[in-house]
Image: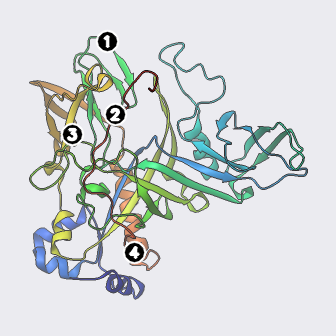
Amino acid sequence: MKTYDEINERIASGRAVVVTAEEVIDYVDSRGLERSAAEIDVVTTATFGPMCSSGCFLNFGHSTPRIRMTEAWIDDVAVYTGVAAVDVYLGATELRHNDPANMDYPGRFEFGGGHVIERLVAGKALQLFALSYGTSDYPRREIRTWFTIRDLNQAIMVNPRNCYQNYNVAVNASDKRIYTYMGLLEPNLANCTYCSAGQLSPLLNDPFYETIGIGTAVWLAGARGHVYAEGTQHAPSCRRTDEGLPTEGGGTLALTADMKEMRPEFVRGVSLPGYGVSLALGIAIPIPILDAEVLRRTTVRDRDIRAPVVDYSRDYPEMTGRTLGHVTYEELRSGEVRIEGRRVKVGSLSSYHAARRCAHLLREEVRAGRFPLAPPLRPLPREQGMQGLRITGEPR
């Protein structure tokens, strides 16, 4: 058994043994579980891909005279102003003003909130335009100006739902092409798409949330952040394998970090034709090896993880609950899977290469003593389902 204090002491002294969730598999195979648990202090996990439920709070500071922003746009993308005078929230999926969306189907969705966030982190100049009704203490009614992230008092990423524990493999069983948040799906099961780093992914290496909880330190696009809550749609009471790995969505994380510390290469706006815009993020989370059982869970392999195959032409939009079976991430990463007896080509919305790079960068930060671990303040819920929206008439 090790404690967080013992591991952090080894990190601070430069003696910590840190490996990635890829490297730990061969390490344990060659040395054995018990010996490895005594030697290894931290395993770094990571993922990179679109995470729609993301956004940021920005504070502009006060102009002279002051303005109470009631409507505002950044590079023509609307921001939420229902907070204090010069605070706004920018959502990753917000569309640019007058974007035709899907009026000429499929829409191109070339620019939106995710792209604004990408430009902001990259240090580029953006235009703010804001309106107000005017008050005695905030008399200004309109403002237009240019700014960069360095001009802001705060730029804080606050993401309600990131790092899905597992996710669907999307297919299209209809006879027409469809456009989804999982990308373009050709008719008659001609292709499938998925979005996960599999054996590198954080919550698949900690399936019962033994070390990842509220308060856990995370590497969010290069910035030190933390888990501030369970993610929205966190549903740990899902179907699982005998080893405890979810065979459907499972858990999620709500994350926050300072955008001024982020690395632009891991914050990228995404355009999804026919669907909308999003934001791709690189996230890495260290797992402290407190005992042999925690280590054993980090040796999960792609061949062990099964993802549900879901028809996005009918079963997903209609919420039927039906799946077309399960495939492993080893099969998905081979580029071809068999679904209902057919050989189906595979495409990925996530980047395993970028996830691996995030895991390596965090590994080096921990080894260098720059990323101490933080024990959870509170565990994530381990028994919780997810309910849908019930449509009712007028309340009685």
2 and 1 marks in contact (CB < 8 Å)? no
Please say if 144 is above or below 372: above
Q: CA distance from mark 4 to mark 3?
A: 33 Å
Residue at (23% x, 18% y) in the render = 173
User: Marks 2 and 1: which is nearer the front?
Assistant: 2
Q: Quadrant of the N terminus?
A: bottom left
Element type where label 2 sits in the image: loop
Which residue is at a point 29% across and 33% down the rendered structure image? 193
Horizontally, is 14 left or right of 199 in the view?
right
User: At 39% across and 60% down in the image, what residue appears?
Assistant: 284
> Which of the 4 image quadrants contains residue 185?
top left
Residue 199: x, y in percent?
24, 54
Q: Is residue 21 above or below residue 113?
A: below
Q: Which residue is mark 1?
A: 176
- Residue at horizontal 16 percent and vertical 28 percent from the top: 324
**Rendered image quadrant of residue 94:** top right
Label 4 secondary element: loop
Q: CA distance from mark 1 to mark 4?
A: 50 Å
- The spot of residue 211 in percent (x, y) is 30, 68
For marks 4 and 3 on the same chain, the one whose residue lies earlier in the sequence: 3
What kind of residue is marked 4?
A: Leu
Nearer-N-terminus badge (2/3) = 3
**Residue 208 percent location from the top left of the image:** 23, 60
Pointer 3 residue: 332
The residue pinned by badge 2 equals 388
Task: Name the residue tied to disc 4.
Answer: 373
- Kindly indicate whether the residue at mark 4 contacts the one at mark 2 (C-beta within 8 angstroms): no
